[in-house]
Amino acid sequence: MNPEKQQSVFLRDYMAEYRTLLANKRTFLSYMRTALSVIVAGMAFIKFFDHPVTQVLGWVFLPVGLAIILEGIFTYNRISRMIKAEQARALDRDERHAQGSST
């Protein structure tokens, strides 16, 4: 393979991996933003409204917000592990390919 083309492919693959990592982080932050909004809304319902239905709704929002936080953490970790595993497989493939072409 042409060395310039090989370098271009390497850079493109590296940038694709980096975009995937950044997308995972953005998704995690979206989970956190949503959870914080739900928790703050629940606290506002509890603190500022006196109607019993609104109070109950506020108390429901609190554990829902915590569940969203936990889901965000688990999703982020799961996707991060998948990305790292794929990077390891790709590195192993590249090493085997380099060894095969050098002999």
Image: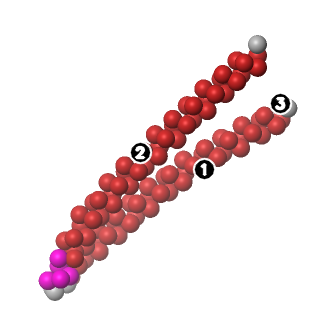
x and y percentages locating residue 17 in the rendered image: 60, 44
Taking depth in this image into account, of 86 and 45 the one nearest to the observer is 86
Q: How far apart are the two marked residues, 1 and 3, measured between alpha carbons?
A: 26 Å
Q: Secondary structure at mark 3?
A: loop
Circle 1/circle 3 CB separation < 8 Å:
no
- Mark 2 neighbour class, 10 Å CA radius: few under 14, some 14 to 19, many 20 or more: some
Left or right of residue 102, residue 33 in this image: left
Q: Residues within 10 Å of mark 1 (few under 14, many from 20)?
A: few
Q: Secondary structure at mark 1?
A: helix
Q: Position of residue 38 (x, y in %)?
A: 32, 70
Which amino acid is tagged 1?
A: Arg
Instruction: Please state if 19 lies on the left or on the right of 56 as rendered.
Output: right
| Region in magenta | 52-56
Residue at screen point 67% across, 27% down: 94
Question: Is mark 1 in CB contact (under 8 Å) with mark 2?
Answer: no
Which residue is drawn at the image coordinates 78% and 34% (left, top)?
6
Labelled disc at residue 1: 3
- Tag nearer the camera, 1 or 3: 3
- Point out the tag, 1 or 2, that comes first from the N-terminus: 1
Residue 77 is situated, as x and y percent measured from the top left of the image, at 41, 45
Disc with the residue nearer the chain's start (1 vs 3)? 3
At horizontal 76% and vertical 16% (from top left) the residue drawn is: 102
Residue 19, numbered circle: 1
The quarter holding residue 10 reads top right
Q: Is residue 68 above or below residue 1?
A: below
